Image (tube, rainbow, N blue to C red):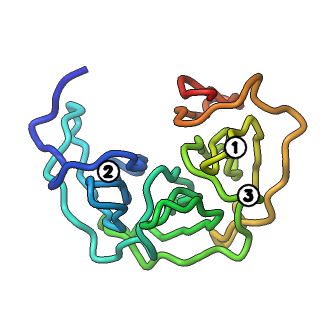
């Protein structure tokens, strides 16, 4: 790991991050004073270094922290998280990534997650979004959900996968590769 010269414009934790087409995108987070709706992006240089972060004109529709984000087919998808008051959400948002790397307007998807949650992992693979684990403030989850990404970029209905995580997990990392989901870390209080 190498510390990048270009840091985020302000300190944040519980952000969501994803990469698409040579750029990094960071959404929301908690800056110590509550959740934020800010969206930043930065170019990734051929040597892997991160360029200067810029704040996107189109912020999230609400302040979120502990949410998850993934990119698929030129769009960013955000699920769940805590709102500015710390209440777990089930909302799903998406926004197009423009050709110049800027963000289009965020829209709320009609199909929300089956339950409100934060600290979950999310990844996209082969035209589907996958969400695993998380919590809602009092309960911790091992459930795995998935939903199709429709040709128009909207998210279809979420279904519960028959295979859950081996144990409850909150604050986990998740990624997909070559037809497999990988989950690491997290707590199981």
Mark nearer the viewer, 3 or 2: 3
Q: Which residue does the image show at 37% across and 59% down from the upper left? A: 28
Q: Residues within 10 Å of mark 3 (few under 14, many from 20)?
A: few
Cα gap from disc 3 to disc 2, whole angstroms: 31 Å
Of residues 87 and 111, the one nearer the viewer is: 87
User: Label 1 belongs to which residue?
Assistant: 139
Q: Is residue 178 left or right of residue 159?
A: left
Q: Which residue does the image show at 58% across and 36% down from the upper left? A: 170
Q: How many marks?
A: 3
Cα gap from disc 2 to disc 1, whole angstroms: 35 Å
- Looking at the image, do the residues carrying marks 3 and 2 touch, with CB atoms under 8 Å apart? no
User: Label 3 belongs to which residue?
Assistant: 115
Position of the C terminus, as image quadrant, is top right
Q: Secondary structure at mark 3?
A: loop
Q: Is residue 103 above or below residue 186?
A: below
Mark nearer the viewer, 3 or 1: 1
Q: Position of residue 111 (x, y in %)?
A: 74, 70
Q: Quadrant of residue 44?
A: top left
Q: Which mark is residue 23?
A: 2
Q: Which residue does the image show at 59% across and 44% down from the upper left? A: 122
Cα gap from disc 3 to disc 1, whole angstroms: 11 Å
Q: Secondary structure at mark 2?
A: strand
Of residues 28 and 140, the one nearer the viewer is: 140
């Amino acid at each position: 790991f190498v510390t990048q010269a270009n840091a985020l414009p302000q300190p944040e934790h519980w952000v969501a991050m994803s990469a698409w087409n040579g750029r990094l995108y960071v959404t929301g987070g908690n800056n110590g004073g509550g959740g934020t709706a800010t969206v930043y992006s930065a170019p990734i240089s051929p040597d892997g270094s991160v360029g200067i972060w810029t704040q996107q004109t189109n912020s999230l529709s609400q302040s979120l922290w502990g949410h998850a984000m993934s990119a698929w087919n030129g769009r960013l998808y955000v699920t769940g998280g805590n709102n500015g008051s710390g209440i777990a959400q089930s909302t799903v948002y998406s926004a197009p990534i423009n050709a110049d790397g800027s963000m289009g307007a965020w829209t709320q998807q009609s199909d929300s997650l089956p339950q409100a949650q934060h600290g979950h992992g999310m990844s996209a693979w082969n035209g589907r979004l996958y969400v695993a684990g998380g919590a809602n403030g009092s309960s911790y989850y091992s459930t795995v959900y998935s939903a199709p990404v429709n040709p128009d970029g909207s998210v279809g209905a979420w279904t519960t996968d028959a295979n859950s995580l081996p144990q409850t997990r909150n604050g986990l990392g998740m990624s997909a590769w070559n037809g497999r989901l990988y989950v690491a870390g997290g707590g199981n209080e």
